Image (cartoon, helix red, strand yellow):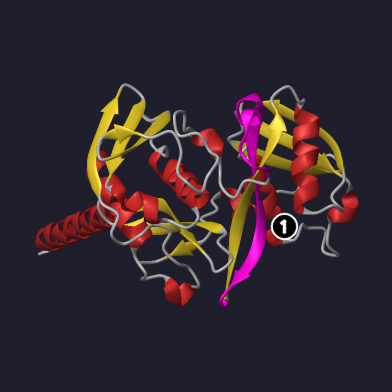
Amino acid sequence: MNKKLVIVFFLIVCLSVFSCIYLNQDEAQDVNETYIQTVIFQDKDYDLVPVSLNLHNQMEMETDIRNKIDLMQSSQLQSYGLYPVLDSRLEIQSIQLDEDILTVSFNDFLYTQHNDMNIVEALTYVLTDYDQVEQLCIQIDGKDISHLPNSTIPLNHLTKNLGLNNFEDASTFLHESVPVMIYQEKTIGNYLYYVPKTLRIHERADLFYQVKTILNHINSKIYLLDATLKDHVLTIELDSHVLLDNETIDRTLEELIVLSLKSLKDVEDVEIKINGENVRSLETSQIHYNYIKM
């Protein structure tokens, strides 16, 4: 009798373990099947807003590009105060990747846009957001074009360095500078978004100057004491007056600082120190900003 009880108990344990493993595998598959992608919309002020969307199926690059363009043509986010950047009649004719240059040919409805600079920035930001793509070439009807009518941005060398919502007009300075994305909080409709604007800093500017410039644009009351970069981690030392009464940094301000500073070259993470202690909160280690669940 005792032997039978032992066998039954053993079978129950085995079944329980198997069930746990099976459920965990299902959860892991659900996580793996959902991934975050970024597309660009615009608000009524024509500010470009990166939006993080959860897409449930990872796909090959060409299909992914077509889906992103379709999203940027859609009006389904108007209830969030966001409007399409691209004309709904715009069509992709062909997509070709040659080494690290992505060439995308559109129909001539690319010419119908009223804010061509927004179009070029949005397309460049989204279509160069692939590890294998370093440069974008835009064509119309299979032919290279040098400019769009209402934009001064040359289209023969579009890279990630172009940025979004540029402070300055594009010029030759574009190729003598490094772009930094400075995030600010903006109310659009009834929602709060983090909206980046690209400031260009001369490529020979030192790290301290770059960090100080970014922080001044986020909040002019932030006082930078030191900035160092080691193993892709940027460590900044701030004056203690930025602390709240509970000895922490305002959560939104911290996120704006981290997002903005991570746009610097070679920076993968940011450490914030005050009086020699790291005050960076764990909650900002994974920031999915402007996230909208589809």
Q: Please tell me whether mark 1 sits on a helix, a strand or a loop.
A: helix
Res 70 quadrant in image: bottom left
Who is closer to the viewer here, 260 or 233?
A: 260
Question: Which residue is identified by label 1?
Answer: 253
How many neighbours does mark 1 have within 10 angstroms: few (below 14), some (14-19), or many (20 or more)? some
Q: Residue at x 70, y 40 (%)?
A: 271
For residue 184: magenta? yes
The answer to whether residue 234 is above or below residue 39 is above
Q: Residue 189 in magenta?
A: yes
Residue 1 in the image: state x and y as whole percent.
Answer: 9, 64
Q: Residue furthest front?
A: 149
Residue 142: name its quadrant: top left
**45 above or below 99?**
below
Residue extent of the magenta highlight? 168-190
Q: Nearer the viewer, residue 193 or 56?
A: 193
On-image quarter of the C terminus: bottom left
Horizontal placement of 192 versus 39: left or right? right
Q: Position of residue 32 (x, y in %)?
A: 30, 49
The amino acid beneath tag 1 is: Leu
Q: Report the side of 168 relative to 116 (left or right).
A: right
Nearest the viewer among 103 and 208 is: 103
Residue 234, picture quadrant: top right
Q: Is residue 94 visible?
A: yes
